[in-house]
Image: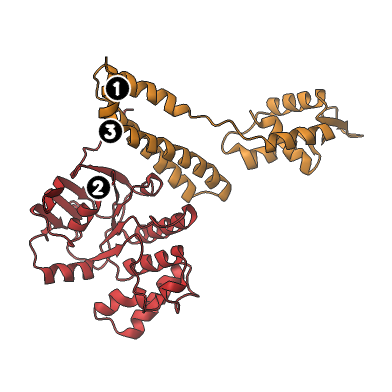
Amino acid sequence: MSVPLALLGLLEREPSHGYDLKREYDAVFGRGKPLPFGQVYATLGRLARDGKVVAEAEPGAGPDRKRYVITEDGVTELEAWLAQPVPPEPHLQSTLFVKVVLALMSGRPAEEYLDVQRAAHMARMRELTELRRSSSLVDALLADHGLFHLEADLRWIDLTASRLAALAAEVRP
Amino acid sequence: MRARTPAAGTDDLDPTVPMVRARDLSLSFGATPALRGASVAVAAGELLAVMGPSGSGKSTLLHCLAGILVPDAGEVHLAGRRIDDLGEDERSALRRRRFGFVFQSGQLVPELTAEENVALPLLLGGTKRAPAIAEARAWLERMGLDDLGGRRSGELSGGQAQRVALARGLVATPDVVFADEPTGSLDSLAGEQVMELLVGAVRDRGTTVVLVTHDARVAAYADREVIVRDGRVATTVAVPG
């Protein structure tokens, strides 16, 4: 989960209050899933405990009015996280792979299953394409990410579909 | 499918009749069958993607729908009228008057400037040069190419050339645009620009589009996709709940 790192990244630009930080997070990264206030303050509390941020009480303000400032440790952690590649996760392939092999082993219509999966992928790709056409560049970037992943799955589906006969020969007892 | 209004300037468009319909098309090249009973219907204003593996017959199907190839058997109808049994001259006139074409690449006339290339369908249709060039310029502006009208195809990038080709395919306000891998030679960003412009232009006018592509991200711009396999259009599957 990248919420703590995203908050560190926002705080690196300038110190901020929990409320402003939440609003900024929602505007840039929320994409229809706003961050609950409880999570913002709990996360900031953990970051303060771990020395990644310090909470400065503002003179004259109420008891909850704290201004959060990123520490050098926080910047180091943020930089290390940014530079680290995200683990590649071929998640769909594993489920669909098991379905295809099981279908072939039991003589069920694997091609039909793949066709249904292809249609479902295309339907989702149409939604994301429409979303991208009608949204900001930031949302479009997210939609593109989804589209490229779905496209990769589809290429696997097409290649598998074209190899079903050979696969069946290999997996059938 | 999204609701569309039929293209203006055509008096024979009944919204209940498919704009393009093919029934049981078969066509062989020598001993090699390319189409083996392909059937498809495209509604007026619909953007249909035709997908399928290489060699499945999807481009041959497009060429039959567009009256470029004549099937050995089966029928092709345009807005309810049979067109596969027309003579070459009539089919040629039909293609010029009612169809627009966009292919993968290399379709511009290299001796002509970009604006002359775009104006070509109008000039061939009898429009005088000045209004044809003016219309071509308006389309180039719409494609974001207003500064490049005087360039020849060799002086354009791949993406620019394809946008010129798109303008040429749309300039004569066709009822149906046939596009065969229109982004096939472009990178992702240039391909996206071409698809955005194509979809924007056809949605405005309710133009019907038949789009052959192997690229799922391009097909995702369509209202619907069909898969061609072994010369037939596979049955469209419904996605469960």
Query: What is the chain identity of the residue bearing mark 1?
Result: A
| Same subunit, tags 2 and 3 | yes
In the rendered image, the quadrant that contains the N terminus of chain A is: top right
Q: Kindly indicate whether the residues beneath marks 3 and 1 are on one polypeptide chain.
A: no
Q: Name the residue nearer the viewer: B177 or A158.
A: A158
Assess whether mark 1 and mark 3 are in contact (beta carbons under 8 angstroms): no
Using the image, determine if residue B43 lies above or below residue B8: above
Q: Residue A170, which numbered label? A: 1
Which chain gets the orange colouring? A
Q: Which chain's residue wears label 2?
A: B
Specify the subunit that label 3 lies on. Answer: B
Q: Amino acid at mark 1?
A: Glu
The chain assigned the colour red in the figure is B
Q: In the image, what residue occupies the spot 46% across and 55% down?
A: B187
- The local secondary structure at tag 3 comes to loop
Q: Is residue A19 visible?
A: no
Quadrant in the rendering for residue B165: bottom left
- At a point 52% along the width and 29% down the height, the residue shown is A89
Q: Earlier in the sequence, mark 2 or mark 3?
A: 2
Q: Which residue is mark 2?
A: B55
Percent position (x, y) of residue A148? 47, 42
Quote the CA–CA distance across marks 2 and 3: 25 Å
How many other residues sit within 10 Å of disc 1, few (<14), some (14-19) or many (≥20)? few
As drawn, the label of residue B238 is: 3
Name the one closer to the observer, B146 or B206.
Answer: B146
Q: Report whether residue B46 is seen.
A: yes
Q: CA distance from mark 3 to mark 1?
A: 30 Å
Percent x, y of residue A50? 80, 24
**In the rendering, at what x and y percent does residue A39 appear?**
69, 26
